[in-house]
Amino acid sequence: MTSSPTGTWQKILYRKQAFPDNYSGGDAQFLKELRKNVSVVHYDYKSAVYGCMNFLTHLDTLTMYFVLFLNILHSNWSPNILYTVFVSTIALYLFFCKFLAVVANSREHARTIVTLFLFAYAFTPVIRTLTTSISTDTIYSTSIITAILSCLFHDYGVKAPVVSYPTSVSSGLSSAIFLLSRLEEDTPTLLLLVIAFTLHAYGAELRNRMFHVYPVVSSLIFTVLSLFSVYCISSFSVELSVFWALLHVFILFVCPLILILKQTGKCTIHGPWDEAVPIKSMN
Amino acid sequence: MNWITEKSVLIRTVEAKLLLMRTFSFTRLLALDVAISLYIWNVWAPDWNYNVDSFWKQTSHVADNLNGTINWLRDNPAGLKLNTPVNETLAWFFSYHIYLWTTFIGFLRYDVFYRYVTNSLVFGLSTFSSMIYDLSQIFFLHFNCFDAYATKLCYLCYYTLTVLWSLVRGKKHNPLRERMDTITLDTRQQFLATSLFVILLFILPTVFVYFVVFRSLRLAVSAIQTVIYFFGTWPFQIFALQKYVVRKYYGKPIAEETSDSPAT
Amino acid sequence: MERKIGPYSIALVSDFFCPNAGGVETHIYFLAQCLINLGHRVVVVTHGYGDRKGVRYLSNGLKVYYLPFIVAYNGATLSSIIGSMPWLRKVFLRENVQIIHGHSTFSALAHESLMIGGLMGLRTVFTDHSLFGFADASAILTNTLVLQYSLINVDQIICVSYTSKENTVLRGKLDPNKVSTIPNAIETSLFTPDTDQFFKNPTTIIFLGRLVYRKGADLLCEIVPKVCARHKTVRFIIGGDGPKRIELEEMREKYNLHSRVVMLGMLPHNQVKQVLNQGQIFINTSLTEAFCMSIVEAASCGLHVVSTRVGGVPEVLPIDEFISLEEPVPDDLVEALLKAVEKREKGKLMDPNKKHEAVSKMYNWPDVAERTQVIYQKAVETGSPGRLDRLKGYYDQGIGFGILYIVVACIIIFWLKILDIFDPPAKNRLKEKPKSQ
């Protein structure tokens, strides 16, 4: 039990020091390692807006899908429009495979397309007659709920623990299947099924990469898409389209502002008592 | 041959009776048995034909009711969300089987055979009941088949559904570690899994309804057969009860007790 | 010669005591033992364990009150402060308690008794054994709802390391002068080295602890195969059980280390020494520790310790001779382990017996008890805030939850007065048997 030789206080416990027990280095050393707001991320308005555009693009594509379905159901649009959409979806998918996909194996992609078609073709009659005995309202509400679920678990280019690719794809596809059971003919069912699947399975990656690599082009596409979706909804109900437009404005401009303003009020305390975050090695 | 002797209640009870006839208390019961049956014979014998005819009428009623139920189900009743194509298929399948069943029992409709059965009433109520029991086994054989089909189908559907439910959320059961593993599927598998899941989800109520119908039919038949079985073996039950009561309350074994127990 | 302190009548209150075995439990047990040896009167108050209710005497003469309270979650009682008040009042009056010493933030019983004892006019001391974060929901609730209000009226506070003191001061918004640092200790006579095995056994690295995320089981999973790949003969012994055991078994199978990694499963506390004696190096991968008892146990058995630099660990043992510290990065820990193995093979590690001697001097229970009784003296000699001051303290901390505490305190004051009329304190005090010495 010797006191430390020089008489200065040291932050050690294994030696009894010549200071009373409630002394801990005075103001110089006490809470020296306290750090505030270490992990605060400084967001800037522009990147927040781009993030919102990413989210709204997904919502817009979903809305366009619903609009397409409704128009086909009520035979408002000619089937040619459906064929065009279908062909463009396939073209986008091929573009995605060739240029943006991580695993650029053409054999795998061809296999995917073939399997998709075959099974979609096989399942179409089953899906069409799946829910004939269930009321339309139930079907529509279930479809919307699963679509919202799919949006919740979707990947918007931000790493978050709630993101789950299987859940998002499954719920998106189920929402499409519920809807498709209302249709009368086989061909639109098949095409819409393929479109829905491609949208949910590959849309996320394509969109995230586009926003990451070509932000300006993506924002232009987004503007066109949102205006078009507002216009399409207005053919069904004007109030809804106004609401939709307002929602766009709110999410796009007001929400990033709220984020930036609230970040300044953040105050976190860090120090040696924090639980360490183990760094995983690469392999 | 062995299988028949094991399964047939009639043969087993006759063997047991022959074995136990040496015991006086059992012979008492047998005598009572024959007395009751003779009494019933007297009551029934005059209008035996009427009885047989009414029996056949009842059987065809059962067949008609069954067909009627299947047709009723075909029309998607009572707010049950039955899937039409599956409903149609299952209804057609089971109607055809019911038709097979009615043809089958048509073959069994021979007067001579039933004379023989009714004459067995002489040998005692228990003999008659055991014979009826054996006949009912043959009669209602097809119901067991119906139940088996419906159960298997329903179980398959349910099991696949539970597995797919885990799969669409990205989890798979690991039998080695007995826990749920996270698994990433490629897009084809994801598509298949989700489509199959939704399809099976809607088909399950239909299959379940058929399962309920045929399982309850088989349970009803089982209940009737249990009652007949009791009548077929009532002397043995009373005999065992007697022995038990004597042993418990009087503490001495019956003098004429044999070493083998009744083969019930 | 110092003036003799006391003797005081002390009640050690906590939810965690025998028959449970853990850090807090052993701390209370040995502290009570040493305080009795110093001449104070000590009783322990805790909740009932299964059938174990009522008053019991432990083998060293310690009197323990097992009160029949309901255990809600994780060993802590369901606190119903007003409901526990008659029980605790009775116990404190009977034993003529002057100082109430509560242990562990997780123990609701400790907080209750500090509050009630304070309102009865007794002196209060609290010891904190763990570190907390600030950011997750449970931490925010514990800090604002419990700690600030509970500790504002406690006379003295003890923490087990300087990091723990900083943490507690920040969490409870306390005056640093009221907080003292007294480290934990271990019973070093139970953890002696075995020189035979130390020098003759092949190089063995030992890990003992629960296999949970908090204790760094993931880090361990990464370290073991790397070390085994770079060194041909080193062995690992892993003791303990938990949710991460499956991952460790998988790692063992994946790298085919069945002969080099031994997994012992759950170890009872009395077998720890035998296991520690089989090795020469101890690895600790915890992600947060206030004061790590296991490394002191390992050092007492003569092992060299390799640990992560978290919490209060850097303060516990002298660096380089007794312990090697690294950040919780797998590669750094692997390097440190390999260096330690090299030192062992060259025979440059400190002799285990010398290490044991040194550790016995660093941490022993009589020392801890002496320092604690100085704290008790401080608590007794500085005045205790009166009842109004206590209520004002709650108000000052924030009226949001403070109103709740004020109301409860008022109800307790009221009922204390009523009980004092019907059940006078004088009648309750245990008549001391005349000592025959």
Image: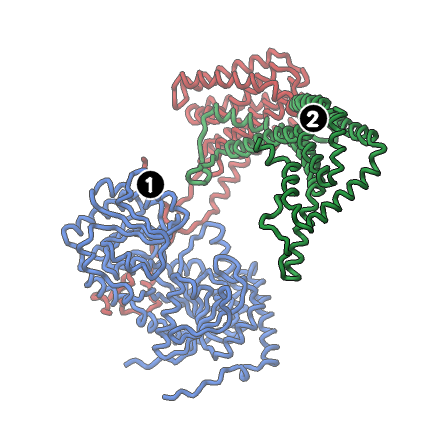
Chain colours: A red, B green, C blue
Q: Quadrant of the N terminus of chain A?
A: bottom left
- Residue A139, by quadrant, is top right
Report whether mark 2 lies on the same chain as mark 1.
no
Q: How far apart are marks 2 and 1 (CA)?
A: 53 Å
Q: What residue type is labelled 1?
A: Met
Q: Which amino acid does label 2 sit on?
A: Ser
- Is residue A34 among what the camera can see? no
Query: Is A142 positioned to the left or the right of C38 in the image?
Result: right
Query: Is C380 positioned to the left or the right of C328 in the image?
Result: right
The numbered disc on residue C251 is: 1
Residue ID for mark 2: A133
- Residue A144, by quadrant, is top right
Chain of the residue under label 2: A
Chain of the residue under label 1: C
* CA neighbours of label 2 inside 10 A, class few (<14), some (14 to 19), many (20+): some
Secondary structure beneath dot 2 equals loop
In the rendered structure, are the residues bearing label 2 and label 1 in contact, judged by CB atoms less than 8 Å apart? Answer: no
Say which of B2 and C38 sits in front.
Answer: B2
Vertical placement of residue B7 versus B105, above or below: below
- Percent position of residue C330, x then y: 30, 43
Q: Say which residue appears at 24% left-offset and 53% top-offset.
A: C281
Q: Residue furthest left?
A: C346
Secondary structure beneath dot 1 equals helix
Say which of C322 and B199 sits in front.
Answer: B199
- Percent position of residue C435, x then y: 40, 87
Vertical placement of residue C97 versus A256, above or below: below
Say which of A266 and A62 sits in front.
Answer: A62
The numbered disc on residue C171 is: none
